[in-house]
Amino acid sequence: MTLSSLPIVRLMPKADVRAIRHGFPWVYSNEVVLDRRTKALPAGTIVLLQDAERRDLAVATINPASKIACRVLDLDLTAQINATWIADRISRALAHREGMFAEPYYRLIHAEADGFPGVIVDRFGDVAVLQPNAAWADAMARSFAEALRDIAGVTTVILNGSGRARGLEGLDDRTEILLGTAPQAPIHVPMNGATYMADVMGGQKTGLFFDQRPNHAFAASLANGAEVLDVFSHVGGFGLACLASGAKSALCVDGSEQALSLAQKGAEASGMAERFAVRQGDAFEVLAALAVEGASFDVVICDPPAFAPSKKALDAGLRAYERIARLAAPLVREGGYLGLCSCSHAADLSKFRNASARGIGKAGRRGQIIYTGFAGPDHPQLPQLAESGYLKSVFFRL
């Protein structure tokens, strides 16, 4: 497909052209001319993006039904968005990860920050899980799978098409084996000295959260000889890392029986089952119950889902983060540590930190901030896109 053959999508005069030229990858629906011709373009169509003066800006993709109408793919106007283009960008992403990780367990593609708007790929050894959360990537899923095989050497590629982002794009939920065969059991993932169980077929998101790896490691540095409480633990993220670093015990709390079962299997595979326990239930209720029971811990970590997934949900989300801190703080022994996390991009670090501090204060405790962490380096941030820096982790000594 040549530049001259691409459909043209033109920006409104009020659109921020400078931001696009400087690397901002999104164009909202109120910034483009959505005439009858443009609205008729199939979601995921590759287009030539022009400013209001008809000057060429970028090669992009359009979804007329999405709030993010256009996603910039390349500022190089000669770019051909095909299998070769995909393979070249995957090669660049892979070179970054291979230089940092001794074993092939990491996020291989982190969406816009790796030049692939709306695309996530997590790698579990020979298995890659692809999340095409934008229409253009969903349409080119086979090309992604083949490039992952040819460039990264994986033998199985699973398309995990689920989640809120796909719904916003008007995409259906679907799971498909694009290459190879589906794993018949959870994959053993070594990380921070522990073994985690990743259910890449039926688990949450891609099956495991790699983003918290450095924050798991920091929590583990506090945990030698400690009694640890890991709330919203999923498959045992903080708890297993702390046990691997010498924690006396770890109690993992989650609402999902399936996740806790995988956490238990991870503890067994790590040789730490005798120091590991689980408790299923609503996290808010369990925290309150533990206080009534008189329980206390040296290290408490709370890693909830996104309470503020959008700006509309921000105020309610901040109240929820404050409540978590208020319920968790009384369980921390004098001189102990409380780690609080947020994966809500709408709640920036300052707002999240302030909400956490309010909750600690309302619990009658006082804390020092000793660590602020973010996602690991396999989750790079695009400087122009605040949403790519979604994860925050703040540790207090109470």
Image (tube, rainbow, N blue to C red):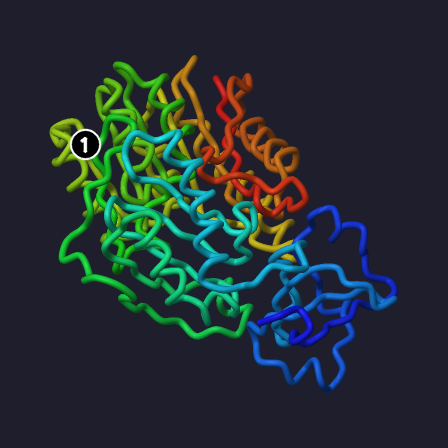
Nearest to the observer: residue 64 or residue 141: 141
Nearest to the observer: residue 350 or residue 44: 44
Q: Position of residue 88 (x, y in %)?
A: 47, 50
Q: Say what amino acid the circle numbered 1 marks.
A: Phe
The structure residue drawn at horizontal position 27% and vertical position 43%, both measured from the top left corner, is: 235
Quadrant position of residue 229: top left
Task: Judge from the rendering whether residue 106 lies leftward or rightward of residue 20; answer left or right.
Answer: left
Residue 214 lies, with reference to residue 61, above or below; the image says above
The structure residue drawn at horizontal position 54% and vertical position 63%, both measured from the top left corner, is: 81
Q: Quadrant of the N terminus?
A: bottom right
Nearest to the observer: residue 199 or residue 142: 142
The structure residue drawn at horizontal position 40% and vertical position 66%, both measured from the top left corner, is: 141
Q: Which residue is mark 1?
A: 276
Task: Judge from the rendering whether residue 376 lies leftward or rightward of residue 186; answer left or right.
Answer: right
Q: Position of residue 354 (x, y in %)?
A: 63, 32
Residues packed near mark 1 inside 10 Å, few (<14), some (14 to 19) or many (20 plus): many
Residue 284 lies, with reference to residue 3, above or below; the image says above
The structure residue drawn at horizontal position 34% and vertical position 42%, both measured from the top left corner, is: 286
Number of marks in the rendered image: 1
Q: Position of residue 278 (x, y in %)?
A: 22, 40
Quadrant position of residue 36: bottom right
Q: Position of residue 64 (x, y in %)?
A: 64, 76
Nearest to the observer: residue 183 or residue 143: 143
Task: Judge from the rendering whether residue 26 lies leftward or rightward of residue 168; answer left or right.
Answer: right
Residue 323 lies, with reference to residue 362, above or below; the image says below
Residue 66 lies, with reference to residue 92, above or below; the image says below
SS at mark 1 in the image:
strand
Looking at the image, can residue 292 be seen?
yes
Looking at the image, can residue 398 be seen?
no
